[in-house]
Image: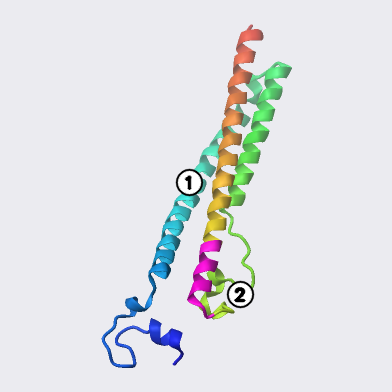
Amino acid sequence: MRERDREAAPGPSPAGDARPAAAAVTYAEREGWEFVHFLGAHLASLETRAAILIPAQVAALIALWSQFFTFEEALPHTLAWVAWGFLALALFGAGWLVTPERLRPGALVGYGLTGQHSDEREAILAEVCDVVQRRVRLLHAGLRASVSFTLLAFALVVLAYGVDKAFFAP
């Protein structure tokens, strides 16, 4: 049995002492795995937010589409179309965020420990942290952009409505 397997094996060690398996894990490694669990929970929360955002954006896109005929003058009509374009861009961005990404060959996330080239627990922990951190950063940036485009579209629709009523009232 390799040293790593002996340390990770549950129950008493082969030497006969009653040392629990958790004692074999270093403090830094335990902190690393706790950080991975924290990032995983944060990642799940961000993905849920992105999935909730999409139906709201679809509803806004349909609502604006159904109201195009109310903007009869060129300027408000153009503002409404630009807003619709920003909404569509925000929706496609949010859809891209929630679409699973392609896994590289041998990735720990897709293939488990059998696809690993390294037997080092620290290397495995570092790879998991790296994968989750990249996904969290991507979701943060993507959600900010998607929500920003949605708010910009809302502001343009309000402006179009205001211009239509203020300058082109019957």
Query: Which of the pair 155/22 is nearer the observer?
Result: 22
* Quarter of the figure with residue 7: bottom left
Query: Which of the pair 24/79 is nearer the observer?
Result: 24
Residue 58 x/y as whole percent: 56, 39
Q: What amino acid is found at the position of numbered circle 1 in the picture?
A: Arg
| Residue drawn at x 56%, y 34% as measured from the top left | 60
| Residue picked out by circle 1 | 49
Q: Which residues are magenta?
A: 119-130
Mark 2 crowdedness (10 Å alpha carbons): few <14, some 14-19, many ≥20? some
Q: Quadrant of the C terminus?
A: top right
Is 65 positioned to the left or the right of 46 in the image?
A: right
Mark 1 crowdedness (10 Å alpha carbons): few <14, some 14-19, many ≥20? some
Label 1, secondary structure: give it: helix
| Residue picked out by circle 2 | 106
Single out the mark in the foreground, 1 or 2: 2
Residue 152 x/y as whole percent: 60, 30
